[in-house]
Image (spheres, rainbow, N blue to C red):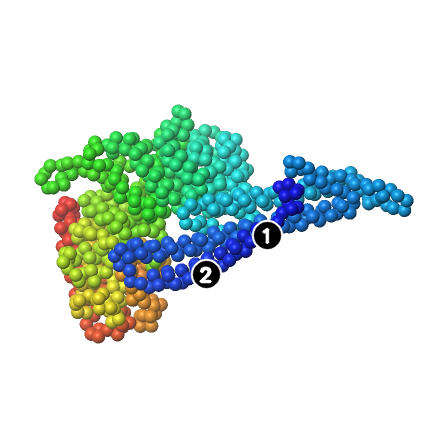
Amino acid sequence: MDLETLRSARFGQLDGAVAAWSTLVTNLATLATDAREGLKAKAEKADWSGENANVTKGFVDKTVAEFDDAHKQAKSLWNILKDTRDELKVQRGLLDAAIERGRAKNLTVVATGGGGFTVSMNIRPDSAAKGTTAADHSQSDVDGLRDKIQKILDKATETDHTGSVALRALVDQAVLGFTGAEYKDRDSAAHAIEEADDLSALAKKDPADLTAKEFDALNAGLKKMSGDELFAARFTEKLGPKGTLDFWAELNTPRVVELQSSRGDHFDDLQQSLSLTLATATRSDSPAMTDWKREMVELGNQPVSRGSSTVGFQVMSNLMRWGNFDNRFLDDYGNELMKAEKERTDNGRHEAWRAGVMDPTLNRTGSDSGTDPMTGFMKALSSSPDAATEFFNDTFLTKQEDHKFKEDTDGDGKKGMRELSNFDYLFGERDWPKDYTSKGEDSVAGRNAMALALEAATTGHPAGEIPTSDLPAHNAGQAKLMERLTASISDDPERLTGHGYMSDSIGQIASEYLPDINRATTDAGEENTSVPKLFPISGHIADLEHTDVTRLLVSLGQNPEGYAAVEVGQKSYMASLMDYHLNPDLPDAQKYPHSTEETIKEITRRSGEIGGTLAIGRQEAVLGEANEADGDFEHAVNQKKGIASGVIGTGVGIGTSFIASPAVGAAAGGAAGTVTGAVLEQLFKDTEPDKLKETGKTVGELWEDSTERNTELARVAADTAGRAHRSPNMEQFEEWTREGTRDGFNDASTAGQKMAKDLDTDIPA
């Protein structure tokens, strides 16, 4: 900024802009509050079902979020604009004061062409007359004033430039909608941009020349700033897609360098921070980031350097294991990755991506080498539910393509080409490459990451998170994938039991589809209108076969984590159903059209069958070849205590305020507070540490123990709900729950033995 520009600056228009933005911020704050407390609050209280549960409610949630983001972005823009104006006014004031002080010393400041200025001594003729004195000045005064003015102009230039860059960068973050980035002033936004420039310069260096001090600065900076939207986009843009791949590949290339020996144990921290930074950056819609995402996908199947066997997908996938990446980017990336998979496996005929001795260790967490790009990509999908759902339902191979996968589709004994989705291929058919941990043990990271991605894809929330009450109901894509998953495990239970470490994710999935699973156990046809009322479902229904459900539950029951997820979820769901159906205020249109006795018996029968089917799987694990300790199952159930206060897939699908209402608390008694709480409190009492001793029970004893426990929990659910709602005939509840649970366990035994016969296995029951 030159002298005359700052001296003659008129801030009227800027003042007007600041005032206008202040008004906009105030109005948007009001709209955001109204949307959150009015629109969203009403939406959460409404009874959503069908398309409304998926489309309308989801639209409301997104609209409310957009109002919040609009307010945040407007406030950030206002803060930066106001701060820039105020700082420029300060600098102009300092400039005027400096010029006045110079004039007092007869120093003149004059602007010159091209934005420059001069400071000169001014001695007037009359100042030499007799009796007069000239102001003292010297060359040092001239130089001092010149330097002072230049410093003021430099500061004003920096303020103007960084303010402009920050404003443009913030606006560029979202082409459609608004960014949620928040900056309290110009300095914080300018700092993010400056940090990005400095750290990207370090990442551009040849890792062989990177000092330990520079590595530490890069590592600490990315860890601190990875969630800052301006920083992340600027850093990623400056580094570039090729630079990103080169940096991580070169840093991990096997060679003897000082950095690997002195900082090698911190590479995992850098990998995580870099991944989080890239994830934040991909959510930017700036032109530079749009180009970055496109170019990164194009580089996916290309060698990272001449003569290298490592390609872009292998590098980038390891920088995608953390963070929420942009859905569109994940979709484009996944499509190209699967094309590369088809090429390298000859349409799935053989394995690909096996690690070589001289390959760089691209994953520094120790769980696997990072050579298989599918592992890191699955981890990325596990944090991005919408992208995961779309990916798994996409087609991998069509019937017209040349491949080895065939099936008899019409029962005539002749097998024809089969169409495979990405799910069909990855879960059921892929030859996952052999890999090892940093300790030399067999790695399970690939399939485990796939299970996490499936959890996100079917449930609609990131893997590992407990669903909240405002989670949208299952959509068509999620329900379809659940159908495929259940049928695949039914077709070959070894796909799950042979990889038991996936059971925690698959168990969580099943727990969030318990309304659908309960319906499937009834064998009710489409003409039956009462079952949908007994097990109400919002959104799309997963159309599951009873036999498939049985095989899924038996398979899950053989793993403590899988068993616990469904066991706790089902007991919670049963309690919610009791509370729901025994509430006399339930609208007539939603009531199950049968007597209280039939209602209680049917709820407990379905719950009993699910509990009994899980028990069969547990027996198989304890008494079969797996030789799993029975106490591990009790321990796994007890571990759910810490998250039982959240929704464990149980209330999902009912969608009314009647479920486990806090108003029930007084009647429920104790700390439980709700019908669900009372049931889970009883369940966890049975799994306390002092009860986790090996008892050496026989098949019959295990079965009887499971039956008694399920019967007692059903009684607690019915009794607590009955007392809460002052139900008549409560003296008969105990008998009804006992009969219902017994019938359910008999159903489980029959179905379990049929499964054993079909699969030619020995399942004790």
Disc 1 residue type (three-letter): Gly
Q: Name the residue at the right extreme.
A: 130
**At 76% from the left edge and 39% from the top edge, which residue is drawn?**
120
Q: Nearer the viewer, mark 1 or mark 2?
A: 1
Q: Nearer the viewer, residue 251 or 620?
A: 251
Disc 2 residue type (three-letter): Thr
Quarter of the image with the N terminus in it: top right
Visible residue check, residue 260: yes
Q: Which mark is residue 12?
A: 1
Label 1: which secondary element: helix
Q: Which mark is residue 219?
A: none
Visible residue check, residue 696: no
Q: Pointer 2: residues within 10 angstroms few (<14), some, or many (20+)?
A: some
Image quadrant of residue 401?
top left
Q: Pointer 1: residues within 10 angstroms few (<14), some, or many (20+)?
A: few
**Gap between marks 1 and 2 measured at Cα:** 27 Å
Quarter of the image with the C terminus in it: bottom left
Q: Name the residue at the left extreme.
A: 412
Q: Name the residue at the top extreme.
A: 307
Q: Nearer the viewer, residue 631 or 454?
A: 454
Image quadrant of residue 144?
top right
Image quadrant of residue 135?
top right
Q: Earlier in the sequence, mark 1 or mark 2?
A: 1
Residue 583 in the image: above or below residue 438: below
**At 40% from the left edge and 30% from the top edge, which residue is drawn?**
304
Q: Estimate the x, y position of residue 724 in percent, counting from the top left.
A: 28, 72
**At 29% from the left edge and 57% from the top edge, which residue is drawn?**
53
Q: Estimate the x, y position of residue 320 in percent, counting from the top left.
A: 39, 41
Q: Estimate the x, y position of residue 232 in percent, counting from the top left.
A: 47, 43
Q: Which mark is residue 30?
A: 2
Q: Is residue 407 left or right of residue 680?
A: left
